[in-house]
Amino acid sequence: MTTGALALLIGTLILVQILLALWLKLRRRHAEADNPASDITQPRAPTSQQSGAAPQESGAAWTGFRAFRVVKREIENAAGDIVSFYLAPEQPMPLPAYKPGQFLSVRVELPDGTGSGAQTLTRCYSLSDRPHNDQYRISVKQIPGGQVSTHLHEQITVGSRLMVKAPSGAFHLIRKPLRPQVLIAGGIGITPMLSMLYALLDQGYEQDIWLFYGARNGREGIMLPRLRELAEYHPQFHLNLCFSRPEPEDRPGIDFQYAGHIDTALLQRELPLNRYRFYLCGPTALMENLVPGLEALGVSEADIHFEAFGPSTLKRTNKTPRPDSTTESQSWPVNFQRSGKSLAWTGAHENLLSLIEAEGIAVDTACRSGSCGSCQTRIESGSVIYDQTPDAEVQEGHCLLCVGRPGSDLSLGL
């Protein structure tokens, strides 16, 4: 064989190897995109401000409430009305990993207003960082008149003790199949989005990540310098700050990108044509505008995930009917033993809590998703059925109003 022929043969073999390597790489990428169980790419530089490594050996979730200590607290905006609390277990243990977007249930005891007793209140706060194996972070906005948020802001300092329930919640990040992610937040609804964002960036998510964050102005926005830093460091992260009431010192195009509220017109204008997975969290007005708006644009219900604040009246236009929806036409009387009131269940409400609140009956509630157990109520007679299995432990003879509906004539201890 001549020298020229040998060189040609070697060159051909090298080219074949290169083409084979490229083909195998493309196959792996397609397999990852279609396989929800596969791992995403290797972690990149950490993005969160919290110390501690991501969980290597996660602990088991505990039942009920456990004692945690505040190991750090930090004011997160110029207005001073949002504070992050870093919580570590009083008895050291590996913490269970949670799904970014989930929340902690926090229980506190406060004076009952009579001067002679105490009341136990539970509130749910989204975890605002990626999972760590040694501590959790929640970021709490002080609400005017809010008993628990005011107590946390004014009374809870480093070393304070809080009773905490393990992370839970059905609103969380879905990494697979690979798809560009759109995070939409209004006000303090940014907290679960921070957890999702940090987790995606820390683990080297290669798809585009869009964050549309609505706040009144730069003073009220949470962790804005950090978000801008992340946008500069990660080219796949696209930050869009929307200020509804910018102050004179807020510079258009520098401190914020858009004046006004987030709406579908903005999303259509800014998002390239693609199939996205949308996550939304914010006040009811934002949800009532955007969720039906996205559906009207043809976004699949399966690609829209949301969590609203407070009592939600949001109705999905293409929501799949319950398998047993024929029973909803049955009218059940719902009686309240203590107040003497009686209501009729006709199926017009999503759950018992919605029915009760519509009538102005006060009920202690927090998560509104069957996770915290705050709305647990004694069943005096009758039965309650659930469309989803509650995460919270339900005592025998009790029900959770936020995810339950009557299965017969019903009498409740309210």
Image (cartoon, rainbow, N blue to C red):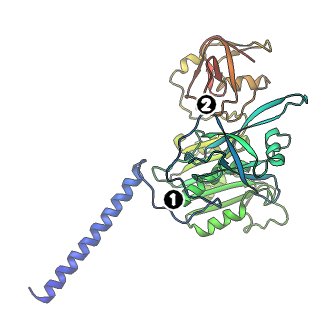
Q: Which residue is mark 1?
A: 203
Q: How far apart are labels 2 and 1 at the CA level?
A: 30 Å
Q: Residue at x 58, y 37 (%)?
A: 62
**x, y percent for residue 350:** 64, 27
**x, y percent for residue 120:** 77, 32
Instruction: Give 391 or 296, whichever is nearer the viewer.
Output: 391
**x, y percent for residue 274:** 51, 55
Q: Which residue is mark 2?
A: 392
Q: Is any atom of residue 162 visible in this view? A: yes
Whichever of labels 2 and 1 marks the residue nearer the N terminus, that label is: 1
Q: Identify the element where label 2 is drawn.
A: loop
**x, y percent for residue 171:** 59, 42
Pointers 2 and 1 in contact (CB under 8 A)? Answer: no
Report the side of 345 relative to 278 (left or right): right
Q: Residue at x 73, y 63 (%)?
A: 256
Amino acid type at circle 1 is Gln
Give above or below for 398 relative to 259.
above
